[in-house]
Structure formats: structure tokens, C-alpha cells
Amino acid sequence: MKRSRFLRVVYLAGLLALIFPSQKLLADNGYDAWLRYAPLKEERAKFAAFPSLLVVRSDSPLPQTSQKELIRGVRGMLGRELRVAKELPKESAIVLGTLEGVQSIAADLQPPKNLGADGYWLSNQRVNGHDCIIIAGATDRGILYGVFALLRKIAFAEDLSHLQDAQEPANPIRWVNDWDNLDGRIERGYGGRSIFFENDSVRADLTRASDYARLLASVGINGCIVNNVNANPRALAPDFLPQLARIADAFRPWGVRLGISVDLSSPKSLGGLDTFDPLDPRVQSWWKEKADEIYRVIPDFAGFLVKADSEGRPGPSSYGRTPADAANVVARALQPHAGIVMYRAFVYDHHLDWRNPKNDRARAAYDIFHPLDGKFDENVVIQIKHGPIDFQVREPASPLLGGLAKTNEAIELQVTQDYSGPRRHLCFLVPMWKETLDFDMRTDGHATPVKNIVSGQVFNRALGGFAGVANVGLEANWMGNPMAMANLYGFARLAWDPNLSAADIASEWTRLTFGNDPLVDRTIDTMLLSSWPTYENYTGPLGVQTLTDILGSHYGPGVESSERNGWGQWHRADHDGVGMDRTVATGTGYVGQYSPEVQKAFETLSATPDSLLLFFHHVPYTYRLKSGETVIQHIYDTHYQGAERVRDFVKEWESLRGLVGDDERYEFVLTRLKYQEGHAIVWRDAVCNWFLRVSGIPDAKGRVGHYPNRVEAESMQLTVYVPVEVEPAENASGGKAVACQSPARECAASFHFSGANGTYRLNVQYFDQNNGKAKFRIFVGGRQLDEWIADDTLPNTKLGADTSTRRQISGVTLHTGEEIRIEGIPDGGEVAALDYVEIEPQPK
Ligand code: GCV
């Protein structure tokens, strides 16, 4: 750049900085997540004595990463530039190294003894007469974790004058799984395309992979499976392994080891053998040679993740072999290199006969794996989903978690919100995970909470831990919503320390993401902590599970999609009652998979907590809960309460305008919450109307099926628009919508306002299919009030609950008799469909 042009740019930037407040210039798109290192304001004064010198002796990669990160964080938050030295100077300093390393610099230090692998020690010590901050790691990885821990303390503006913090992770395995396909799509991923793959190759630019590893390392994650568990055999192809090695290189400076999902049929499909029978010696040699080949290019390769005999994936059952046969063969190939096999317990038959009341998918994992306990090699870990079905909004802890005393285990949690309102609904899952982790399995009559079983502590296992399905993508904010990152943060913090409370984790994340303002912290924490019960309330309470479309997007309601098919996610609701009888006495016998004490908590109706009632029992709609309410009324009430609570989320978020650091994230989250407010109503109405129709029992409060403020589109005066049936009927108000079918160029629906003169909020419920960008215009008394384009990317091409959405127009003055007219212009396959207009008095 020429000097004169350069000066012009500098001048312009300076001018802009004067005109606009700095926060506006620092728009935040969510990329930095909880690592923003935003400048501390008045809190900076607390760090006046913070050293300016950093002593690091080691030149190896992790201490070097740690050094750079510390400099970056201190520069961002405190506005200071740390100097680096190798020897202890005559001034206060930060001393960074392994336990032995820091002692070689300052011999008098007395670090804690027996600090576990990856642990760290942060301490304030007098060294050579100067106040120093010591960051010592049990390993190089521990140093990095110590640096991130110190940076968190600075971000929280904690007093560092009495620093004394020694921590080690509760779990050796702290991995994320990313279900990325090699073509760049991500199964159940909601934040864009893969950061690792495109067109069956590893991406040329792996900057995002490296930034992801940094995020993961900052919260103690030490491994990442980069491809879908529904694995493509190409992941093991000779030309692909060097490409994977590039991802491993991007991870390594952050102490994150790379692993991959493998297809068990690879010896046949990729290797050209005529079998993949694990007990065939040729298959065994194939796996050995493949492992050797991998370690030649990725010496610190973490291991394999296996999904087999599940949802159509090939597995050992093809040859009459067990999961232990298969896991051990693969594990023996990895063992000489210290690699491990994570073998998923998510093995079940998805062609179950739904007519047989004794069939139960929930039984599968325990029935298959419990008899194999003790038969797995030492470097095999059974990866168990937290509940016996599939990441539902409410499930009991999987009995298999308590059923493997002689086998390593890891708990699988789903960070990506597959069944919990993908990217669009606020649903902080940490409280749900905490319930499972704290659940006491009462193994052998002793206190044996799940968290202590999976860590290896209860049964003295060397390996164990956490696997979290993260599915981040190329979108700037990683998961499609900055708020969703609270789940990734929370997962990792629990993997490090499952004793942390949900409230503490929420508060940590909020302060790191939005700053330390107590009002912001309190407001967002309250929203986060109530979001899972809220989501449960308007989707599926009492343990009935999420009443979502299980055959499709797992997004909007699809109450009947789980019934009368082989997938086994049945709720068994019929005219008389609802719920699965899983008791030993009269049901599927699933309850018998728990220890005797836990069985007692679930076998009888009187003992079972309401929250899991319908998971364990089939009851009539008139059955009275512990609260005294009937089941059916509870279903109605919770759906109304849930939808109401989301309305409050919007208000609570609006109270933070101008307080959360920047406008971009604020507006993004606000848009999402407003969408959720509308979609919670779609959920509420669909589920309540379905139960009203099936049970025939009306809502005692008269709400379900009665919507006094609504004008149905099909009852408006239609020009070119035609009424259409929506399937299933409960997924549109009145079961119908109006559509502007091609080749129409423009349609209109109008009606006359029958209320009193006043100020109102108009909610236009319409459908935003993802196969076009229809336009809408709304007129009141001939004046155009609003116009918009239906260009959201909701997960369906059809009219229904996935695509039903709303436009909210506030502060509208209406006069009795005035015409309200909506015009729709279709585009592509999108038919500018309308469901209804709701006119409500303008909320205060
Ligand atoms: C990766 C559910 C999801 C699948 C997922 C599977 C699994 O069934 O619908 O998309 O497949 O779980 O966890 O393997």
C-alpha cells in the first residue's frame, strides 16, 4: 500500500473510532465464543501488581502455545504486553512450566505431590524476594490448562493475591465427536458445513480446525473424533491418512489428539477381502497393518470410534460374533501404539415389532453388553449414551452405566441439540446432564453415582470418561447460535469436573461470553437454567420423551411419528392412556436392568417420580400425579406454561439491550428467541390438540382448541390463494393453511378487524419452506404496514410444524371494521402459505 493511501486509511479509522463508540466497531459474530479476552474496564485496577515478565524455559510445542496464549489473553484483557525470559529476573514474574520445570527455575517451590495427569497448579509464591505467579502442569498439556485457568480468573476479575489452585481432570477421556461426512455435510450439525472436510478430501485451509482445537483445549478437551460415526470406509484409505495427518498437525499444538470413526466392514469394502469377520486371521492382520500405517503418519493418533450393528451399520452380528470379538480385534491392532477403541453401546434393532408389548428398544444396550462384561480388552471403552433411547428431552440414566463392573466406560452426551430444538431453541443441557451424572446406581448397595462410574473410580478402571457429540460447523458462531455454545462449554467443564454445579457453569460461560455485569450474569443464567425444563414443558413432559418428528428432522412436533413403526421410540398413547409399561411385573422388564434399590424407585407407580412417569408406566389420562393434577391436564398446563416462559425469555433478553457488549450478537439472539416464542406455540398447539383429539378430554381451563384472537387464513376472503390440508392436521391451526400455488404470481387473503379501536400486536403465522423465498406484504386500511421475505432455512420443504413460523408486528393502531390484507408472492417451490393472524392487545 502506498504511504499516502495508508495514512488516509489510518485517518479514516481514527475518525470512525471517534464517531462510533468502540463497542460498535468491535462487532462480535460469536467466533471467539468464551475466549473473547475483552478488555476489563474499571476492574483492571485490581491487576496493577500483575507481573510484566513471563519466564518459560521449554521450547516444546505445548509450553510455546501456552506462552503465546497467555500473552494474547493478558494483552486483550489487561492491555499489557508480557516480556518473555528464560531465567528468573530480579522482578516479579509469571513462571510457567512442568512441575519439574518450575522447580528447576525456583528450587524452593513446593508443588502439590501426586498431581494427576493433565493437572495444573496455580500459585502465588515469593521467589528470590519477588511475588511470582506459578503456572505448573503435571504434563505439558497441564501447563496449557493452567494458562487457560489463569486467564479465566483474570476474565472474572478474581483477586490473584492469594492464588492457590491445584486441579486435575476427573476423567482421562475428554473427547468430542464430530459427525462430519467426508463430503462436507454434518449429520445432525446445525452450524454449517464441515470445518474438516469438503468433496471427500480434507480441506486445504485448516485454520478453523486449529481454532476449534484452541477452544477445546481452553476447557480441557484432549481428543476429537473428526468424522461421522456412520463412517465412510474412505476414512482409512491410504491416500486419506496423510490428509488426516494434517488435521492432527492442526490439533497438536493444543494438546488435542485426533481419532476417527471406522466402518467395521472396511477390511472388505476398502481392503478387498471377502470378509470382515473379526475372527478371521486375514481380517485381524488387515487391522494391524492399517493401525501401523496410521501411526506412521500420526504418531499420537488417539484411536477409533465404532458404531456397528446399529441403524443399518455393518457389524459383527453378520458373522454371529459379539461386540467384544469385534472391539478386541481392532483394539489389539491399536494396542502396541497406545491407541484405544471407543465402541458404542448404541446397538439396537430398528425393525422391532411394535405390536408386541414386550418389545422394548430401551433394553437393547444392557441386554447386549452386560453379558459381555469382562470380555473386553483393556484398551476398549464402551461409549454409552446417557439414556437408554436416544438423547431425548428426558430419559432415566442408562442402566448399562451401572452394568459394567469389569469394563471401561464413557458416557456419551449430545452437545449438538438434535432432539432439543436444533440451533433455534434455547436449551441449556447441563442441568439435564447433571441429573444423569449425579444419579446413584446403588451398585452393590453402595453410593455409586454415574459420574464416579464413568471416571473409572467406582470399579477401579484405568480408562473412562466423556464423549460429547459437538458437530460444530463453518458458520462464524460454530453451532448456529452463540447461546448453543453454552452446551459445548458446559460439556467440557463437566468432563473436567462433574461436581461443578449447573449454576456455576452457566455463570462462568455467561461472564466469559458477555462480561461481568451482575445484571447480565443473573438474567442470562436464569434463562439458561430454566431453558431445559421449559423446552421439556412445551415438547413432551412426564418422561413421554420429545414428541418430535422422529422420522425426519427431529425438529417440530410429530406426535404420531414414533408409533406403529420399528424404531421403538414409542409413547403408546391411545384413546385411554399414555406411556410405556417397562415394569418387571407387567411390562417389558426394562426396570429389572437396574440394581435392586433403583428398581424399587421405578417399578411401582407410587414410587416413580412424575418426571419419568410415562417412561416407565402406561396410565390412564385421568391418573392423578403427585401434584394432584390429572395426567391430561398436566400435559395441557405444561405446554401452556412452557410457551409462556419463552415469551418471558424474549422480555428478559430485551432488558439487556446495550449491556451485552455488542449489537450483532444481541440482535442475533433476539431474533432466535422471538422465533422460539412463535415455535413454542406451534408445539403447544400441536401436542395439546393431538391429545385432545385422541383422549377426548377437554382442557379444564378451556384453552386447547379455542383461540379467540385468531383469524384462520382459510376463513379469510381469498384471492387466488387456495385452502390446503396440512398433514398431520394438528401441525397447523385448524388443520389447514392457504397456499399460493404456482403458476400464480400473487395471492391475497383479507378480513375485517372486529375488535375495538386500539393498539395491537399482530402475529402473522405463515410457512417458511426451504425451497424458495416467497414475499409477503401486509396492509391495514390500504396502508402497507410491513413486508418481508420468507428466507429462513427451516428444515423442511413442506407445510407443517417444521416450517410454521411467525412475523410479529408490534404497536399497530387498528380501528373497528378496518381491512387487514396480506399479499403473498410465491417463489420456487415455496407457496407463500399462511396459517392465521392473531391480534393481541399490545403487551406492555
Ligand atoms: C449418527 C440418532 C440420529 C442419527 C445418529 C444416531 C447415532 O438415531 O438420528 O442421526 O447417527 O442417533 O447416534 O448413531
Image (tube, rainbow, N blue to C red):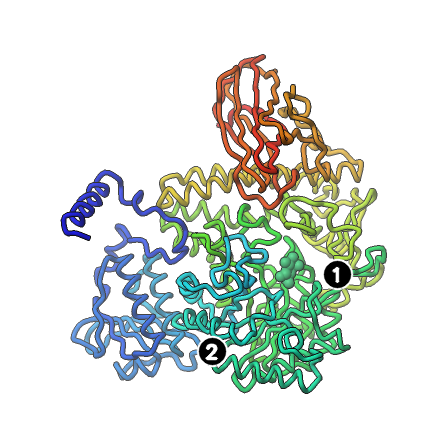
Q: Amino acid at mark 2?
A: Ile
Mark before the other along the chain sequence, 1 or 2? 2
Give the farthest residue toward the top.
817
Q: Amino acid at mark 1?
A: His
User: Which residue is under mark 1?
Assistant: 350
Q: Determine which quarter of the picture holds residue 145.
A: bottom left
Tell me the quadrant of ligand 1.
bottom right
Could you tell whether 160 is left or right of 368 in the image? left
Q: Secondary structure at mark 2?
A: loop
The answer to whether residue 122 is seen in the rendering is yes
State the image coordinates of residue 341 (x, y, percent, origin top left). 59, 76
What residue is rendered at 16% in x and 52% in y? 2
What residue is rendered at 27% in x and 79% in y? 57
Q: Decide: is 684 above or below 36.
A: above
Q: How many marks?
A: 2
Q: Decide: is 182 above or below 762.
A: below
State the image coordinates of residue 616 (x, y, percent, origin top left). 75, 56
Could you tell whether 787 is left or right of 828 in the image? left
